[in-house]
Image (cartoon, rainbow, N blue to C red):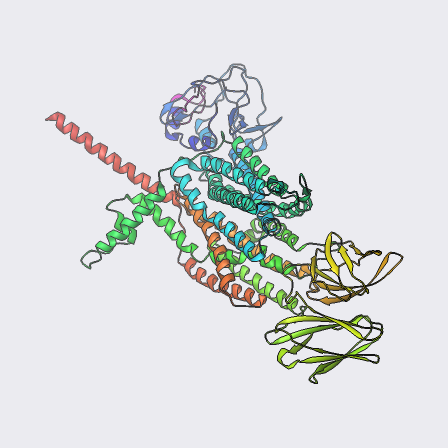
Amino acid sequence: MSWRAGEVPEDWKKVNVNSVLEMEKKEGPDNYKAVTASPQSPKRQNEPAQQPVSPRGVDIEGTTWSWQRCGALGSAAGAVSVLAGGRRAKRAAPSSGWEPSFGRRTGSGRQGGALGLPGALRSGAGPWRRLKGRRKNFPPVAHIVSCLQRPLSSFPFRASFIINSDFFEQFSFFVTAGVLIIYCINFLRWDANFTAAIYHTFVALCYLTPILGAIIADSWLGKFKTILYLSIVYIIGQAVLTVSSINDLTDHNRDGSPDNAAVHIALSMVGLILIALGTGGIKPCMSAFGGDQFEDDQEKQRSMFFSYFYENTAVASFISAIVIPWLMVSECGIHTKQECYPLAFGVPAALMAVALVVFVIGSKMYKKVKPQGNIMLEVSKCVGFAIKNRFRHRSKEFPKREHWLDWASEKYDKRLIAQIKMVLRVLFLYIPLPMFWALFYQQGSRWTLQATSMNGDFFFQIRPEQMQIVKPILLIIMIPVADYLVYPLIKKCKLNFTPLKKMTVGMFLGSMAFFAAALVQVQIDKTYQVFPAAGQTQIKLINLGTVPATVHFQPQLQSVDVASKEATGYMTFETSKLHSLDIIAANQNKTELLELREGQRYTLAFKQGPTRISSTWREDNVTSKPAKRESLVRFINNFSFSINVTMGDMRFGKLDPLSVSNYSVIAEESWPYIIKASAALTYCVVSSKILESGIAYTISLDNCIANILKVTYFEDLIAPNTVHMAWQIPQYFLLTCAEVLFSVTGLVFSYSQAPSNMKSVLQAGWLLTVAVGNIIVLIVAGASAIQQQWAEYVLFAALLLVVCIIFAIMASFYTYIDPNEIEAQFSKEEKEEDKKDQDSNEREAETGSCL
């Protein structure tokens, strides 16, 4: 006989033990007829009335449960006999005549631990042998019943489908989010600030839409159908985003750039909105639906499930950090080869399709809780009525009630009011939580930008965005360490480390992580050049001649000696005090009158000629440290004629004698670039030196001998990256520990404190705190007047520390509850009331018949 997944142990617990003992006493164990265990619940739809019992046992949740001896049961005759609900349910013994036993048979061996049965069952005793049709030595039925009443403690197989499906969905989301910033900057040509705003808005929307998903799941479709339908929306959104990234869609002139950017932007926005709706609707339902697959007595297994569920995030984040760089180096296109964004977005779309298939495969095994009406609307009406009714009865003549929601008791039943109280108590605790997420999600933006100014040489070069790999690696390690080492040790010390205390410690560690980031930032700032402030001007001198020179800044400010083929650093002057300068080289002299702008950098390149000193001024286009890890390159033409200059695929154009090009950003590579200089009768080539990030290179093109270009390098350290990226590991470690204590615990806490019909709503409320946290980042970034990055880190750390203290005080007043017990108590009271009403009706009927 086959029961639905997860229902057999619960039904077996309902066996009427007293009736069994009474029957055993009456008939005796030896004369007891051979019948099989029957659940007390009514017959399921489409279930045959009689099914032959396999000699290997019954099939439950896809696992064959064999008959095996329980303790000292001895041999039994063909089947088990119990009494279900006071009625005797019978079934013929298996025709094969195998000796039945209770337990689990796997392969050629037997084990009994799955049902938690004692004695010989655990040791695998009780060999299989054919019976000779006799019914003797039948075990005491009470012993059989005691074995059957033990709860099932194994991890439900059906939950593994949900975990695997969630992994693919998480991986798909991380890849999409990781590629999005690069796509907006390089393909849609948006600036960094607008791209960051779009990114955080997208993330916030992804965590706002869970409210919609929770309403749909708990009110109409149920969790299973909600996940199914919104997964399809998710896939459509990723497909639209993939199409939007196809360069050839509007590249009619085949120049490698889209001719109609509006089409790509519109498609991108539609795709992102659909993705946000899809992933937002799935997020609250997936974890809650997974929690539904466990029985009430499987709290430990449910807690393990949430840990596995959260490890999905870590593993998906880790793999995506590896995959994204590989996707970004790929090139594709019909007419011109470009960065292959269709592949970068197409891979997540395919993975989301895989997630949907995996989820659907387990559909027949899932335990599906039916939606219980439009609960959100009912909750809103109940809260509104309570407030309205309380306002109407605000006079002192009306007695006070225990809780303000009790003012809704005139219209709504006590069960609903009690459930709303449970939800509101938890939602009240959620108020301080967004501050944690405001810090947490900056590791993908601020901390990555911090890494662009650091040295990534770990015996092999690490890119700044790849430092994000540290977090999932630490998370994969720390979750089992916390579950199997830290928490058990704390429990052995007899410390009451409640979920809310764990979350408080997590918030404190998150604050410490940002203090650590501030210390690292202070060390990075020490390596930066000082750029001109208001009222200041900076000047750099480059001597391209063959003799040394002296420059006097007037009126009598200072004198600087510059050797041949050398350059000075940037010198800072008060703009209003600097009027002119004199250049003296050998026996030649030149005076330059100055009209300089405040807050600007200038380069003065000069050289001694046969008859005079030639010079050129260049207003530098770099007045602040670079926003990301990169090198800057510009060229000076030291030839006596004009030349065309290229470096790799980058064209610097035609440079006249002694002219200086603008700085151009050069990607950091581990190989040299090819520098070419060409004119009417001249073509020269040379390989560059390996360019390091954080350095501004001025390259002087001096001469050409046998088609080999002779160059001179002048370097400025604008962001030298001398602080190693390894110094970020402590802050990642602290934030990962904070995540394990705060986020993993928060998921379990949210589920355990939620009523049965409002679990998705409370999960959505948890995810809503993430959305608010992202909005806080946008507000602070837009309104903050802080110029120093370390100071901003300290600000966020201090804010979280204050919020941590507030949360600890709030948590100290929280009383943990068991929603199942409260609902069971209401069910019991309702049954007693129904019984009283039934008895009263019967008495009235009897009285009426007597009359």
Direction from residue 670 to residue 769 in the image, left or right: left
Q: Position of residue 310 (x, y in %)?
A: 54, 46
Q: Which residues are magenta?
A: 26-47
Residue drawn at x 47%, y 23% as measured from the top left:
80
Q: Position of residue 845 (x, y in %)?
A: 16, 28
Image quarter hosting the C terminus:
top left
**Quarter of the figure with residue 565:** bottom right
Magenta residues, dominant SS class: loop
**Quarter of the figure with residue 627:** bottom right
Direction from residue 89 to residue 607 in the image, left or right: right
Q: Is residue 94 magenta?
A: no
- Front-most of residues 677 and 176: 677
Residue ranking furthest to the bottom: 556
Q: Is residue 216 visible?
A: yes
- Front-most of residues 627 and 170: 627
Q: Position of residue 509 (x, y in %)?
A: 55, 60
- 42, above or below 560, in the image: above
